[in-house]
Image (cartoon, grey):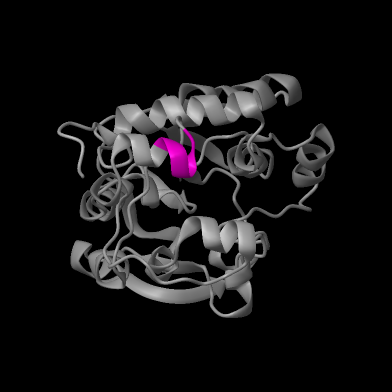
Amino acid sequence: MQDPVVDPAAYNRAAWDKYVQEGNEWSTPVSAEEVERARRGDWSIVLIGREPVDRSWLPADLTGKDVLCLASGGGQQGPILAAAGARVTVFDNSPRQLGQDRTVAARDGLELRTVLGDMRDLGAFGDAAFDVVFHPVSNLFVPDVAPVWRECFRVLRPGGTLLAGFLNPDVYLFDHEALDERGELVVVHKLPYSDVAQYSAEERATKFGADAALEYSHTLADQIGGQLAAGFVITGFAEAPDGSNASASYMSTYVATLALKPG
């Protein structure tokens, strides 16, 4: 069933470029009004689900803080943090996602940097380059997360923080069509799950669409234990449902962690 050769970074880059063209929810830039409010100190950003992240998870004053928005393109979190005073770098695998951030920056006179690349390799940055890494739900698009956590630890300064969002792996137990089309939770997959291992290219095209991004589940041992193994100390934890489908009545779809690099 597995395709002989699939480069997940290249495949998902093309998928997300197309999502931007189609107006994906996570590719819709913030408004000029939201940016202006952020300049006045009235701002929020989303880490998991659709609720604002706890502001206590971020520095009280972002002025001059070096923030890496990791796999966080789309013109949403990065521009808001820049307007709030941070020195922002947006790193993403999709050129068009990064283009959304540059569009907002140009429109609203913001200073932010965009860098194209795979979240598993932050070689574009030196050690201890950032005070904060903001990493919303996106590591489902890579088959291995341990390199992500190691690289986050490396690029953070001692005392720096990682805000990470990711999927509860249990969501991958269920049949996609039954959940989205009929609101039924039908268990069909064994974990850990990946689109590539579970379905052929033809089956994926039929089930998800010909250009859908590839997804991979990761165990909580890899997500939470992986951060601990990289050297982080986890100091905060949150969960949120996915209100867009029937799973919200039964489980938390999203998980968020706040992790500290000891100083």
Expressed as whole percent of the image width and height from the top left, the position of residue 109 reads 71, 23
> As displayed, is residue 14 above or below residue 127?
above
* Residue that appears at 42% across and 25% down: 14
- Asked where in the image residue 4 lies, by quadrant, the reply is top left
Residue 149 or residue 95, whichever sits in front = 95
| Occupied quadrant, residue 141 | top left
Q: Nearer the viewer, residue 64 or 215?
A: 215
The secondary structure that most of the magenta stretch takes on is helix
Which percent across, then down, holds residue 225? 25, 71
**Residue plotted at (26% across, 42% down):** 120
Q: Is residue 24 visible?
A: yes
Nearer the observer, 103 or 251: 251
The correct choice, above or below, for 177 with respect to 250 in the image is above
Q: At 62% from the left edge and 57% from the top edge, which residue is drawn?
A: 181
Quadrant containing the N terminus in the rendered view: top left
Q: Determine whether 19 is above or below 161 in the image.
A: above
- The quadrant of the rendering that contains the C terminus is bottom left
Magenta stretch, residue numbers: 205-209
Q: Position of residue 35 (x, y in %)?
A: 76, 38
